[in-house]
């Protein structure tokens, strides 16, 4: 589905990613883990089309993505959930959800998609007329995922979904991710919480200082002595 080869990217003179190789297959959940500042969010922005790449290739079902703008990538089914959730706090919960369905594929069936979201997240239906800024952190994360569901994505990218949430809410968010993966939607899960991310993923990549240092099946990475020492202090 997504194939990244030798990708380099950054911000003007600041180089952040160096020769990154990665792939995501259909129906697969892939975890990208690494410490703060490793370049995880920059990789999301290159896949989404927010920042250009400076080297390498980025392909979507064999099609070159590098010349395709961000809004067109959304139409193709690539749905990023940015760090911080990106909720519009002065709009209602329902209006935030409708913002996810303004593309050619989903505009005509937005109410059908809305029912799917409410089935997945009943609390959002109860809060549909409230301003999004009044929701709890966990509910806002559900809203961010629900808004992405309104795009009927083929590929969902979640950037630090557990960031700033209480442990009990983090457990709920990852339960939601597990439920969502059952729909067959491919996902790239970008996380600092190595254990949570690898427990829900099929495969994982470890990114450090802009380079992939390790990749393989999630359980192999989770028990890797070097990874456990560096990230878990074990």
Image (tube, helix red, strand yellow):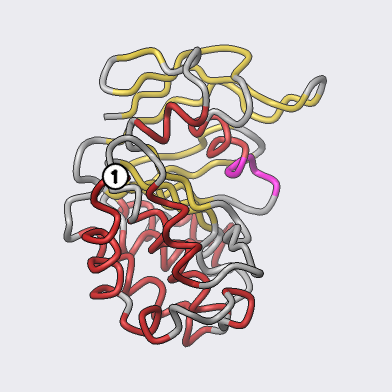
Asked which quadrant contains residue 135, the reply is bottom right
Percent position (x, y) of residue 36? 68, 53
* Magenta stretch prevailing secondary structure: loop
The one of 92 and 203 positioned closer to us in this rendering: 92
| Residue 164 located left or right of residue 4 | right
| Residue 140 located left or right of residue 120 | right
Percent position (x, y) of residue 47? 49, 31
The one of 177 and 107 positioned closer to us in this rendering: 107
The one of 168 and 70 positioned closer to us in this rendering: 70
Q: Residue furthest right?
A: 13
Is 233 above or below relative to 135? above
Q: Residue at x 53, y 20 (%)?
A: 7
Percent position (x, y) of residue 61? 26, 22
Magenta-colored span: 37-41
Q: Residue at x 60, y 44 (%)?
A: 41
How would you rate the neighbour count of disc 1 (Cα within 10 Å): few for under 14, some for 14-19, many for 20 or more? some
* Image quarter in which the N terminus is found: top left
Q: Residue at x 40, y 78 (%)?
A: 124
Q: Residue at x 33, y 37 (%)?
A: 77
Q: Tell me the element at label 1.
A: loop
Q: Would residue 168 be counted in the magenta stretch?
A: no
Is 32 above or below relative to 160? above
Q: Residue furthest front?
A: 108
Q: Would residue 38 be counted in the magenta stretch?
A: yes
Name the residue beneath numbered marker 1: 106
């Amino acid at each position: 589905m997504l194939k990244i080869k030798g990708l380099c990217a950054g911000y003007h003179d600041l180089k952040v990613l160096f020769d990154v190789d990665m792939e995501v297959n259909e129906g697969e959940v892939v975890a990208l883990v690494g410490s703060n500042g490793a370049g995880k969010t920059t990789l999301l922005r290159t896949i989404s089309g927010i920042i250009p790449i400076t080297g390498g290739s980025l392909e979507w079902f064999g099609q070159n993505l590098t010349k395709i703008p961000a809004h067109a990538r959304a139409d193709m089914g690539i749905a990023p959930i940015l760090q911080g959730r990106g909720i519009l706090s002065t709009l209602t919960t329902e209006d935030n959800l409708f913002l996810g369905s303004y593309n050619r594929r989903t505009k005509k069936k937005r109410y059908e998609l809305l029912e799917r979201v409410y089935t997945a997240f009943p609390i959002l239906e109860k809060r549909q007329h409230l301003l999004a800024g009044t929701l709890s952190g966990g509910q806002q994360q559900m809203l961010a995922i629900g808004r992405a569901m309104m795009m009927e994505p083929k590929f969902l990218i979640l950037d630090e979904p557990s960031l700033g949430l209480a442990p009990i809410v983090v457990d709920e968010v990852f339960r939601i991710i597990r439920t969502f993966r059952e729909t067959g939607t491919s996902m790239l899960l970008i996380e600092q919480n190595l254990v949570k991310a690898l427990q829900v993923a099929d495969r994982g990549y470890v990114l450090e200082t802009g380079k992939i240092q390790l990749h393989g099946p999630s359980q192999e990475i989770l028990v890797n002595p070097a990874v456990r020492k560096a990230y878990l202090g074990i």
